[in-house]
Structures are given as C-alpha cells and as structure tokens.
Image: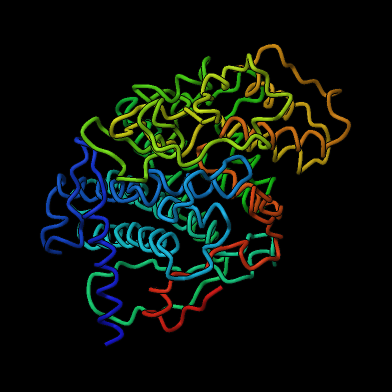
C-alpha cells in the first residue's frame, strides 16, 4: 500500500502542475508521464515536446515563475508584509513555516520534485530509445537541458529545506536524491542524501550541461528561455558561491567574464550589461544580460496570487495587490543609493508607502521572471575574488564599478575607498541587495554566509543555529517516504 501511495503522490503533483501551470504559446508540452512509453520518444517532434514540458513545469508559479524568487526575497530584510496573508507568504516573511503541512512547505517541495521526476523520465527515455531517433549531438543537448533544470530544482530545495553548506562542510542532511524516473509502482522510499552529495550531483549535471549544450541558440528569445553553454557556467558560479568555494567561482566566471572592463562574454552568447538596467525588465526581455528567464505571453499568467508584479506593486500603479512594500529601514534607506541612480526609477511611492516596480506590467502580470542575469555573475566574481584573496582586490572593485556605474555614473569606487577586504565585501553585498532586489537572492545570500535572518517589525531575528533558519520537510514526503527524516 505504501508503494502505491507514493506512486500516487508523484502523479498528484503532476495534476497540481496541470491545474495551475501556465504555458507560453510556443511551448506546447505533453508531459512524458501522460503518454505511452512506446510513443513518447518515437519522433523528433515528440522528443522536443518533452524538453519543453520540463521548461514549462519549472516555470510554474510555485517554482521559478514567481514564488521561488518571492520566498527568497521576503526572507530578507528589505520587504514589509502588508497583508498578513499566509497564502501569499506571511509565514515565510515572519519565519514561521514551522508546520510541515503548510502550503508553502508542501507546494515548493512537490513542484520541485515534479520537475525533477519529469527530467528523470526524459533522461531515462533518451537513453532507452530517444537518442536513436535524433542525432547523438542533438540528444545530448536535450539531455543537457533536462539535467540543468534538474540541477536548478535541486538547488532550490537545498536553499529552503537543508542546512547551508558551511554547516559541517555539507555533511548535514540534504534532500532525497532521485535520479531515475517514476513511471510505475515501486519502492520509492529513499533517505536524505547529505548536502554535499546533492551539491555534487548538481555540479555533475551542470558540467554535463556545459559540455553538451550549444554555444548559442537560434535567436535571442531562445537564448533567454532555453539553456546554452553559458547558462550552465553562470549557474555554476552561483552554486559554488553557495558552497563558499570561491576559487571555483573565479574559475567558472572567468570563462564568460573578460579580465577588464567593459566586462563581456567573449565566447558563446555575447553576454554584457545593458546601458540602462530598466531595459532588462521590458519587452522583449531578451537582452544579452538576461541569461535565463521564465517567459509569459499576453494571454497567460503565472497563476493567481503568484505573480511578481502582483506581489510587489500597488493597485494604483498596475492593479497589483501590494502584498509587500519596501521597509523604510531596509536597503532603500542606504545613503549611498542616490536618488539619481537609474535603479531608483524602479521604486515608486503610493499611498504613503514605497514599492518595487521592477515588474510593472499589469493585467495578467506577465513580466518575464528572471532566473539568471549577467549582473549576478559579475557580482559573484567580485565577491569571490575578495573572499578568496582577503584583499581589496582591484578587479573586484572594477566589477563593482561596472554594476554601480551603469546606473549611477557619479559614484566611482577606487581601491582606496575601502579600508580592508571586509569593507569591500560589505559593499558588494550592498550592491547585490540593490541590483538583485526582487529576483530571489536575499534569503539565500544570508544563509550561505551564516548570517542571521534579520528582525523586522513584529518579527524577531533568527540566529543561524535556530530551528526556523530552514524549513521543515514536507509532511506528505514524511508520510509516504518512511526513510525520510524531518529537520
């Protein structure tokens, strides 16, 4: 009975995706688990459809279509919850998702494992029959996309449900590491792998992706919405940063960041910062700064009460619900963030409160959800150089200037601007809070460095040793997987 229940759980997750997921018009996936094993990989078109299905599932609102970014950002100290609505993350903001049965805890877990299972089924199917239908190179490219999306899903799980890598050098319990597809009843009970083991698999997936993805895709839209070689490299810089393996961050970033300004990628997609940061968040959303984004068309939405614009913008601006305004004591109060900074154009005042308007499109709130930007890679590299050398590194200062300078030409940092390496590292972290606000980095940046979750109005700070520093494991997993233990 237990095996049958677990099998059912996987397909309940699939049903949840089918009921709530949204699909871009040129992505018409047929999930592998819903068609015959004999026909799923019988034609090149169907194989392509399975790849699109994995992308469509990871852009579900409960994943990178909105909620992953939102949950990470509201765990930081820059947003104020204005609705006290658990449905829209009040428990996450207030550090109280202590119940394994809460929607936030259960939904992200089930949706992440749905993506992982869909990727696993596809990878298995390609090994059995799919590669014989398409060329070896094309087949490896498709598998590389699936493995990258699997890696991204596992990475998201570690940020919420596992102790950070610094705690025991990855020896603490991570999440169950599932690498084969679930398409039938079997014993799927599986203990949690260690954090290090999960990160090792993530990096193996990303290395395979780097080696087998195309250097570029056919057009700018596909370069933004489908993985290519530089997508894998950029994501590796994030993963290594989370592991505090700063030398590896530098090695990866150097593959796609030139040694001197203006910093660009000289191979693969020609990534570069845009002259105006606000252009990154406007139609057509396909600048060379956007390494990976989740697309939405005019006739679809990320899902009710999930959209970035709905959360962060007030009704008077674009019909949003103003779930979260900006805390007056947060990064918005930083004296160095000048009013003339171009990023202040994405901050608005309404009804006596301050809001982030980075995602301004109203109606269905169809602004593309950013996942990886070139600006992040530059900041990853800058931070890694400082922390690895423990010096006021000149290139790190130049990278910091590249981010600040494109929005605020009046502020120019020099090596002499910083008393020591710690001061430069603090400046880079401040720049991350400004540049990447609303894109899903605040919570993960705190936990990867072992910093407390900050106090907010009516909410106490959570120490890195606190129980609420990470989430509990989903109660559904605990019920159906006898080998899984809670946090």
Is the residue 220 above or below the residue 293 in the image? Answer: above
Colouring: rainbow
Q: If the image is split into quadrants, where does the N terminus sit?
A: bottom left
Q: Quadrant of residue 347?
A: top right
Residue 474 shown left or right of residue 135 in the figure: right
Is the residue 153 above or below the residue 344 in the image? Answer: below
Q: Nearer the viewer, residue 296 or 390?
A: 296
Which residue occupies 49% across, 50% down?
71
Q: Nearer the viewer, residue 209 or 356?
A: 356
- Residue projecting furthest to the front: 351
Q: If the image is split into quadrants, where does the C terminus sit?
A: bottom right
Which residue occupies 46% across, 58% down?
154
The picture places residue 298, in percent across and down from the top left corner, at 24, 30
The picture places residue 314, in percent across and down from the top left corner, at 43, 32
Residue 71 shown left or right of residue 183 in the figure: right
The picture places residue 364, in percent across and down from the top left corner, at 28, 34
Is the residue 57 above or below the residue 342 in the image? Answer: below
The picture places residue 270, in percent across and down from the top left corner, at 47, 24
- Residue projecting furthest to the bottom: 1
Residue 394 shown left or right of residue 261 in the figure: right
Which residue occupies 46% across, 36% down?
312
Which residue occupies 63% across, 41% down?
251
């Amino acid at each position: 009975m237990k095996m049958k229940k677990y099998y059912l759980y996987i397909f309940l997750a699939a049903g949840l995706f089918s009921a709530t997921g949204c699909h871009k018009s040129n992505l018409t996936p047929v999930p592998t688990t819903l068609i015959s094993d004999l026909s799923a990989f019988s034609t090149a078109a169907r194989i392509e459809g399975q790849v699109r299905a994995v992308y469509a599932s990871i852009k579900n609102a409960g994943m990178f279509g909105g909620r992953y970014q939102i949950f990470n950002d509201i765990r930081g100290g820059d947003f104020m919850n204005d609705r006290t609505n658990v449905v829209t993350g009040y428990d996450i903001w207030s550090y109280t998702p202590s119940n394994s049965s809460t929607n936030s805890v259960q939904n992200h877990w089930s949706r992440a494992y749905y993506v992982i299972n869909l990727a696993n089924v596809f990878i298995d199917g390609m090994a059995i029959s799919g590669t014989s239908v398409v060329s070896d190179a094309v087949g490896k490219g498709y598998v590389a996309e699936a493995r990258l999306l699997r890696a991204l899903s596992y990475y998201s799980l570690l940020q919420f449900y596992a102790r950070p890598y610094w705690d025991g050098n990855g020896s603490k319990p991570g999440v169950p590491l599932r690498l084969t597809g679930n398409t039938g009843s079997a014993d799927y009970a599986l203990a949690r792998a260690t954090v290090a083991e999960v990160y090792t698999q993530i990096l193996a997936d990303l290395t395979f992706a780097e080696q087998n993805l195309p250097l570029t895709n056919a057009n700018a839209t596909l370069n933004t919405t489908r993985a290519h070689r530089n997508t894998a490299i950029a994501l590796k810089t994030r993963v290594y940063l989370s592991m505090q393996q700063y030398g590896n961050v530098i090695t990866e970033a150097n593959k796609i960041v030139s040694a001197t300004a203006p910093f660009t990628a000289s191979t693969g997609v020609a990534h570069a910062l845009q002259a105006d940061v606000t252009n990154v968040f406007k139609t057509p959303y396909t600048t060379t700064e956007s390494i990976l984004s989740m697309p939405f068309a005019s006739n679809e939405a990320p899902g009710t009460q999930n959209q970035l614009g709905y959360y962060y913008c007030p009704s008077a601006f674009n019909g949003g619900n103003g779930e979260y305004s900006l805390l007056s004591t947060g990064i918005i109060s930083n004296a160095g963030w000048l009013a003339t900074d171009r990023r202040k154009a994405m901050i608005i005042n309404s009804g006596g409160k301050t809001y982030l308007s980075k995602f301004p499109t109203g109606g269905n709130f169809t602004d593309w959800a950013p996942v990886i930007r070139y600006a992040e890679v530059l900041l990853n590299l800058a931070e890694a150089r400082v922390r690895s050398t423990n010096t006021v590194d000149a290139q790190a200062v130049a990278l910091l200037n590249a981010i600040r300078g494109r929005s605020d030409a009046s502020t120019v940092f020099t090596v002499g601007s910083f008393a020591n390496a710690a001061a430069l590292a603090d400046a880079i972290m401040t720049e991350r809070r400004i540049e990447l606000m609303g894109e899903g980095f605040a919570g993960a940046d705190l936990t990867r460095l072992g910093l407390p979750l900050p106090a907010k109005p009516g909410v106490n700070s959570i120490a890195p040793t606190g129980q609420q520093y990470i989430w509990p494991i989903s109660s559904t997993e605990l019920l159906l997987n006898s080998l899984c233990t809670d946090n």
